[in-house]
Image (cartoon, rainbow, N blue to C red):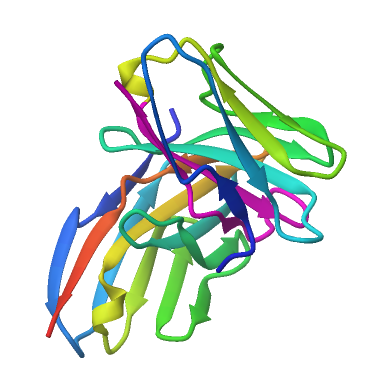
Amino acid sequence: KNQVEQSPQSLIILEGKNCTLQCNYTVSPFSNLRWYKQDTGRGPVSLTIMTFSENTKSNGRYTATLDADTKQSSLHITASQLSDSASYICVVSAEGGSYIPTFGRGTSLIVHP
Amino acid sequence: DSGVTQTPKHLITATGQRVTLRCSPRSGDLSVYWYQQSLDQGLQFLIQYYNGEERAKGNILERFSAQQFPDLHSELNLSSLELGDSALYFCASSVDYITDEQYFGPGTRLTVT
């Protein structure tokens, strides 16, 4: 069964600190992995999309890594800001000619001043 | 602002009723996706349309149906509503499908009483 597990479930950090969120998946065959940021009550916003051949992708202070061998991804946030407080969702899609996503439950990040 | 619009923003209705949610994709995007997000289930993919045709189906109940019209806007119809259908319903759009970045709308919050 395709599954995506995210850890930690929640995280509290101080403004200016770095943090790393984890995503482990069992989706097969792998097509791509996406990280989304979702503010409470709003639509998710795409941060990165990675395919099998990519192992690092950056978007400003957000850097995602992918290890397709161990089926793990991480999202590193550098120099956190208060506006980074949100839920971060990992989505892994299977290959098969159509869109077949499996969602993680997300990591809730709170950045304190 | 993602460029994806959804109406209405909020909807309150009674069990057994039928409602229609509407989505207008970003200009130029041919693919539309529908998602449901509830507190206990997280984000779930419902269905995808590409240029008017159904492309992929996720965890969509038989009581739910959708379509994409020639002008590319989409509607999600929910019938015989149950309390458990209360959720945020998001629409997203992309130029193509599978690996393209998806842009999410602000969502429609449905409350079934």
Residue lying at 45% horizontally and 61% vertically, measured from the top left: A35
Residue lying at 61% horizontally and 30% vertically, measured from the top left: B76
Q: Quadrant of residue B58?
A: top right
Q: Is residue A50 visible?
A: yes
Residue lying at 19% horizontally and 86% vertically, measured from the top left: A17
Report the magenta residues as a range.
B86-113
Q: Position of residue A18 (x, y in %)?
A: 24, 83
Q: Is A65 placed left or right of A13 in the picture?
A: right
Q: Examine the rendered structure and indicate whether residue B79 appears above or below residue B32.
A: above
Q: Examine the rendered structure and indicate whether residue B34 appears above or below residue A37.
A: above
Q: Is A12 placed left or right of B54 in the picture?
A: left
Q: Position of residue A41 (x, y in %)?
A: 34, 53
Of residue B31 and residue B18, the one placed in the foreground of this image is B18
Residue A73 belongs to the span the image colors magenta: no
Quadrant that contains the N terminus of chain A: top left
Q: Examine the rendered structure and indicate whether residue A26 appears above or below residue B59.
A: below
Q: Quadrant of residue B1?
A: bottom right
